[in-house]
Image (spheres, grey):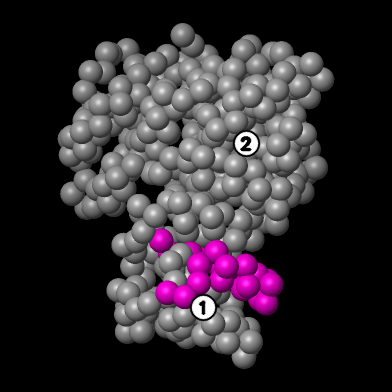
Amino acid sequence: MKRVLFVGEDQPLWQEVRNQPPGFSSQWTAEFAQTGPEALAWAEQGDFDAVVADVQLFDMSGVDLLDEIMRRQPKALRIVVSDHGDLENTVKCIGKAHHHLLKPCDVSMLVNALGAGFTLDSWLPSRRVQELIGKLRWVPSPPNLYFRIAMEVESPTASVETIGQIIAQDPSVTAKVLQLANSAVFGLQLQVNEPAEAVAYLGLQATKTLVLLAHTFSEFDHLPRGGFSVDELWFHSVRVGQFARQISLLEQQAPDLGEQAYAAGLLHDLGKILLAANLPVPFGQALALARQAQINLHLAETQTFGGNHAEVGACLLGIWGLPAPIVEAVALHHNPSAASQKSFGALTAVHAADVFAHEMAPDHATLQPLELDQSYLQQLGLVERAELWRRHCQDLDVQATY
């Protein structure tokens, strides 16, 4: 049995855990502390496998508590719970927590977060990336629209009409979703004019992730652009998502993994928006360095910032509470060998998809071409499969030619 310490004033989630639901009590035992000092006293008495802390504590900040927990029990899984509107405090926990849960949440969500944390070595940013995150003043929160769609998708009565009506309530997101549905990327023969039609073509799960992407891009319309093409990034993201899902299908993976790969592919470059919007001058310098020195952009970003867009984007997705495999795929899509899990997953598909998409995109010709991580593929026994993936992605790209 694994031990979990819950820290913070009493709340519905704590009460659910105390009631010992089977999904929790069969794997974990729980202890509770209402204050920071009480939690640290527990930590001195014995090891915990996980700590679940409210971001707002009565007598100390959740950030300070997580700092202390990291020092005293570095191997413990750390999960922070925060209100949807308390983004400022949640952002401060970046790098301190493995996972974030947004209220209201229930035991099933907690069990999923604990399970993901214990089965995957969750990615955490370096100290330099944490410092970089601290410089970002504009960090979008996931729209309420996303959570409403997520709930609707899980409903047994989910319908494209209902989800289309939800999307239609946000004009900027509606415009982006329709733009995508009518783009050459999907190669549709009909003009899509209504959100419900777009959902029918794109699929329920894909639409859910596209809303996140569209929301972030629509907010970025009013912010500095940092010297790069937003439209180019939009279509590159969609292409990588499609390729990643195709690669998963070729490997005969479960549909859920294909959707995770698609979501991670769509969101893999979200960090570029954060860097360009918050630090447009140094981001422009990183772009110039990449072109002048003929190096990959993520390497130029690391030289400029001490971190790169993959790491920054993964931090944002961690705040939003996306599944750990998606966060890891975004964080390590340029460096999959750093992953502890050496088996095919969303990371594998997104890494390859990103390389193939860059190969097929002339807009990126001025940058050093990305290359497949041959050592990583060798460890997975997939070197020979990579050429098959490339051919199928090329065929898919031809079908969506403008």
Residue depicted at 41% across the width and 23% down the height: 222
**Residue 286 location (% of width, % of height):** 71, 25
Asked whether residue 151 is in view, the answer is: yes
Q: Residue furthest bottom?
A: 45
Q: Which residues are magenta?
A: 58-82
- Mark 2, other Cα within 10 Å: few <14 / some 14–19 / many ≥20: many
Which residue lies under the disc numbered 1?
A: 36
Q: Is residue 131 magenta?
A: no
**Residue 398 location (% of width, % of height):** 52, 14
Residue depicted at 21% across the width and 30% down the height: 168
- The answer to whether 13 appears left or right of 4 in the picture is left
Quadrant showing the N terminus: bottom right
| Residue type at numbered disc 1 | Gly
**Residue 368 location (% of width, % of height):** 76, 21
Q: Residue furthest top?
A: 402
Q: Nearer the viewer, residue 273 or 35?
A: 35
Are the residues flagged by discs 2 and 1 in contact, CB closer than 8 Å? no
- The answer to whether 402 appears left or right of 170 in the picture is right
Looking at the image, residue 3 lies above or below residue 383:
below
SS category of the residue bearing label 1:
helix
SS category of the residue bearing label 2:
helix
| Residue type at numbered disc 2 | His
Q: Of callouts 2 and 1, which one flags the residue occurring earlier in the amino acid sequence?
A: 1
Number of the label disc, if any, that sits on residue 181: none
Residue depicted at 40% across the width and 38% down the height: 212
Which residue lies under the disc numbered 2?
A: 309
Residue depicted at 77% across the width and 34% down the height: 303
Q: Quadrant of residue 215?
A: top left
Q: Is residue 81 magenta?
A: yes
- Mark 1, other Cα within 10 Å: few <14 / some 14–19 / many ≥20: many
